[in-house]
Amino acid sequence: VNKENLTLLMVNDYPDYIDPAEWSAALRIRVPRLEFRLWPERGDPADIDIVMIDKGTPPGFFEGMTRLRAVVYLGAGIDGLLLEDLPPGVGVVRLATRELASEVVQYILLRMLYRQRHVADYATQQISRIWRPIAPAKINETDIVILGAGRIGGWAARLFTELGYPTAVWSRHPKEIANVASFSGPSTLKEALAGRDFVVCTLPLTRETRNILNAETFSWMKRGAYLINVGRGAHLDELALVKALDDGQLSGACLDVFSTEPLASSSPLWTHPGVTITPHVASYWVDSGIGQVAELCEQVRSGSAITNLVDLERGY
Amino acid sequence: VNKENLTLLMVNDYPDYIDPAEWSAALRIRVPRLEFRLWPERGDPADIDIVMIDKGTPPGFFEGMTRLRAVVYLGAGIDGLLLEDLPPGVGVVRLATRELASEVVQYILLRMLYRQRHVADYATQQISRIWRPIAPAKINETDIVILGAGRIGGWAARLFTELGYPTAVWSRHPKEIANVASFSGPSTLKEALAGRDFVVCTLPLTRETRNILNAETFSWMKRGAYLINVGRGAHLDELALVKALDDGQLSGACLDVFSTEPLASSSPLWTHPGVTITPHVASYWVDSGIGQVAELCEQVRSGSAITNLVDLERGY
């Protein structure tokens, strides 16, 4: 078989943890002669070897895809897939995206609790053998807002709520999450941010969300709020953050993503006492997802057996 | 009214986060002339002013309790209460025990993730402006066992499972928790500990569990396992732990409870590089629960209105 060119169509309705641009760039490096198309720019369906989808597909989606060999499903279950439309002989491959989302959710929990439970202070006390309990803020008096309510943001919101924290989400469209206040659209951002002790950014990067964490939105936050950014570096005005920290408007920030990565050694963020920096590791294993797709591309190209197939009868 | 003596009967079927001895001691200090009784040592039911219960009550439990004013319910919901047996005019008071359990669950999550996600290493790297991702162990290759599967242990097990970690519990009686392996009884402890990357102790202190974390059980653990103890100090042989850490049998330990508290400055635990110490703060606000009951005792004694009453019609 050994096809010269390979065409992959990505459909991404739910882009809070998968950035099509990132995947496109990473796959092009790993897979020679790959044509990467992003829905709805489908092009000629007869070219398409592989489809990556995240939720469902519209009726008739697969029509004309005569060359299709595999559907990569980015979701945790395959409930969303319109299986009756799937051409016979096409394999469905599941990525471990639940694990990828879990990694980021864990990062958010960890960094929020690190702050909330005074981990750094206890470490300092231990050096001097000091036994001194430090009251954490009460759970029901600690308000959290999560910007972005997709797989990651929604999951984090449910966990914080289960643990007893008053939690809100802000997203483009209204979300229904039990016991979580939902704000949607730019006009509600000020209200969504007001009074929160923790502001967590899990947003996808879009024209509307670029630079959303800036001097003005910091001024809408509760004085002393703590910021966690696991979205993208371009969500944050880094200089405005330093100023907000110096002014005491924000009490601290944990940043995993930056406008330029690796973060330049000259950045004032490295040494700012209120800033915790991690080197884009909230989802360390996202590379393994890209690696799985690159491997699939080679299998399709060489006509060899496809691995990680979903058993459609069992549903997983 | 102003009763001279006050009698409180505690029923504690589920003692994984509430230690009757601790409550008895703390309440006696705060409430003068309090007689504290622990079920099944009920004594004369006509003496009893206040009952504290944790799950349900047997039929006829309230018979003869002619002086009863209040039932303190330690659970999260009141489903377990046999309301038809409750004498009329007796108030039901709910303690914020869900929040207390949540605090400990959060501590466990925090300390496990602190280790798993290399928080200390990133802090060190930041000082030198080093941008270097460090691979966390993969989620599905990180095994956790939780000793004790009550409210805290069971909750933590469910959360770790939801996040994708292979999780087991070990407890006196078998537990059914979805996707969690359950081991029960002393004969299964060796198997329950074998191969786990994290061992979390949430056990109540009983004759059977005293000193359960000792040289022999350390030898059953996976080489390099990490221990988290939020049970009681008497669960752990501290000298054996230091030896297991020095030998490399354990890679580290996070301890919140100690055989003597405050931990003596002379303890080698303070300065051991593998040990993280916190001053019994996994459930910082347990004192607020005791405070709520002390307040209730004064209300009953003075015949004043009882606060924090559950609305039995609404069920919470």
Image (tube, coloured by chain):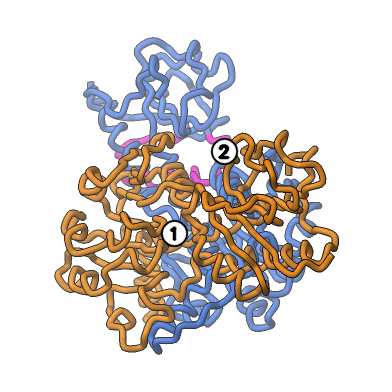
Chain colours: A blue, B orange
Q: Which residue is mark 1?
A: B108
Horizontal side of residue B55 vs B196, given as left or right: right
Q: Position of residue B44 (x, y in %)?
A: 63, 52
- The amino acid type, in three-letter code, at marker 1 is Ile
- The amino acid type, in three-letter code, at marker 2 is Tyr
Between marks 2 and 1 in the image, the one whose residue lies nearer the viewer: 1
Q: In which image quadrant can residue B269 be found?
A: bottom left
Q: Position of residue A211 (x, y in %)?
A: 65, 61
Write the residue at 52% across / 78% down.
A133
Provide the residue span drawn in magenta.
A12-36
Q: Is residue B299 above or below residue B75?
A: below
Relative to the observer, which residue lies in front, A4 or A166? Answer: A166
Q: In which image quadrant can residue B263 be found?
A: bottom left
**Secondary structure state at the residue bearing disc 2:** loop
Q: Is residue A39 above or below residue B217?
A: above
Q: Which residue is mark 2?
A: A14
